[in-house]
Image (spheres, grey):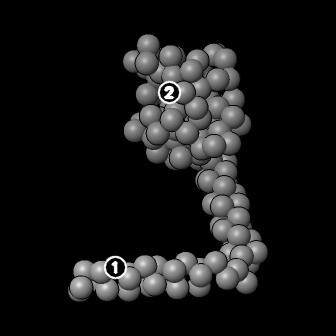
Amino acid sequence: MNWSDLGKKIADFAPLLGSALGPVGAGVGALISSEFGTENTPDAINSFITGNPEAQVKLKEIELTHKTKLQQIKLETLQAELGDKANARQAHNQSKMPAYLSIGLTVLIAFGFLIVLR
């Protein structure tokens, strides 16, 4: 299990907390593991949640207690993702590959029609 999988499971009980557990969820995982007294690994936290009926309530408490920090983490993650996409667009805006692919597909479709019409 990884942090994203654990985040999806936790999002059922505490949506903000679960969304903060993404690809870089070790920091939020440390918060959860310290509250539960487990190792800071997705598997250890998952085992604790699965074996403890009070864990859902505790997860909601953690979310409410650290709501501002979790929102900040979510915002920073979103900003990083958007920045990455903007950089990718800017780095590849001079690429001729989309034009080549469009021309190639048009030629293939034209040949396909010629073959069908014969």
In the image, farthest residue toward the top? 51
Secondary structure under the numbered disc 2 in the rendered image: helix
Residue 75 at least partly seen: no
**What residue is drawn where x is 69% and y is 34%?**
26
Question: In terms of secondary structure, where does tag 1 sit?
Answer: helix
**As rendered, which of 10 and 109 lies closer to the eye?**
109
Task: Determine which quarter of the picture holds residue 17.
Answer: top right
- Residue under pointer 1: 112
31 or 103, which is in the foreground? 103
Mark 2 nearby-residue class (10 Å; few <14, some 14–19, many ≥20): some
Q: Quadrant of the C terminus?
A: bottom left
The residue wearing badge 2 is: 58
The residue sitting at 38% across, 86% down in the picture is 110
Of mark 2 and mark 1, the one earlier in the sequence is 2
The amino acid type, in three-letter code, at marker 2 is: Lys
Could you tell me residue 53's position as x and y percent? Answer: 40, 18
Q: Quadrant of residue 21?
A: top right
